[in-house]
Every structure is written in C-alpha cells, then in structure tokens.
Image (tube, rainbow, N blue to C red):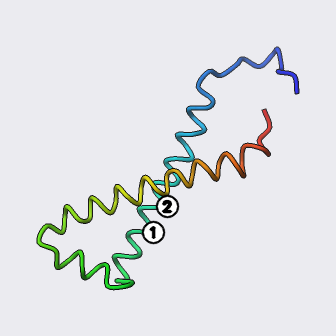
Amino acid sequence: MKPDPKKPHDPYRLAKFVGLHAATGIVAGWVALLILLWTDIGGLGSLVARAERSEMATVMLAIGFGVSFGFVGITWGVLAVLPHEKD
C-alpha cells in the first residue's frame, strides 16, 4: 500500500496507538479488580479488608492488575485491530 502524498505523516501514530490500548487495558484491569474485591470472590475482598495495611495491598493489586491487563490491551490491539486498520 502506497502512502497518500496528500495526507501528512503522523510521527506519533504508534505512540498514540499503544497508549490508547494500554490505557484501555489498565482501566479494564482496575474494573476487574474492583469486581473481585466488591463481590469477595475467593475471599479476596475480606482478606484485603482484614490486612494490617489494606491500602498497600490494594495499591499493589491495582498495579499488578493494571500492568497485566495493560499488556493484554496492547497485545489485543496489535493482533486484532492493527491488521484491519486502514491507513
């Protein structure tokens, strides 16, 4: 596919693409964590609530879920969206 000479090249296209999909994944991870804590699936919510430093446990879980789901979001974007995206 030849680039369109009338359309200017966006040097930040890849960074925008990765940032958008990473942010989507991070938000999805935080929502999943919120659901797990709120519904107390597997006793996770009560375990965190009873912890001596429950705020620290919540932050550590949020970071872990955010990073994991963020990478899943980027991977989904590259494997599912990018091949079908039109320039």
Q: Is residue 70 left or right of residue 59?
A: right
Dot 1 lies on which element?
Answer: helix
In percent of the image, x 38 and y 70: which residue is there? 34
For disc 2, the neighbor class at 10 Å (few under 14, some 14 to 19, many from 20) is some
Measured in 3D between alpha carbons, the distance from the residue under mark 2 to the one under mark 1, in whole angstroms, is 6 Å
Residue 66 % position (x, y): 42, 55
Question: Which quadrant of the figure contains the C terminus?
Answer: top right
In percent of the image, x 58 and y 47: which residue is there? 74
Q: Is residue 58 left or right of residue 1?
A: left
Instruction: Say above or below: 15 vs 83.
Output: above
Labels 2 & 1 near each other (Cβ < 8 A): yes
Dot 2 lies on which element?
Answer: helix
Q: Is residue 63 left or right of residue 76?
A: left
Residue 71 % position (x, y): 52, 50
Q: Amino acid at mark 2?
A: Ala
Which corner quadrant of the image does residue 48 belong to?
Answer: bottom left
Residue located beneath label 1 in the image: 32
In percent of the image, x 39 and y 76: which residue is there? 36
Residue 6 % position (x, y): 81, 16
Instruction: Say above or below: 68 vs 85.
Output: below
For disc 1, the neighbor class at 10 Å (few under 14, some 14 to 19, many from 20) is some
Instruction: Say above or below: 8 vs 45.
Output: above
Q: Amino acid at mark 1?
A: Ala
Instruction: Say above or below: 67 vs 12.
Output: below
Q: Residue furthest left?
A: 52
In percent of the image, x 19 and y 64: which residue is there? 55
Q: Is residue 73 left or right of residue 63?
A: right
Residue located beneath label 2 in the image: 28
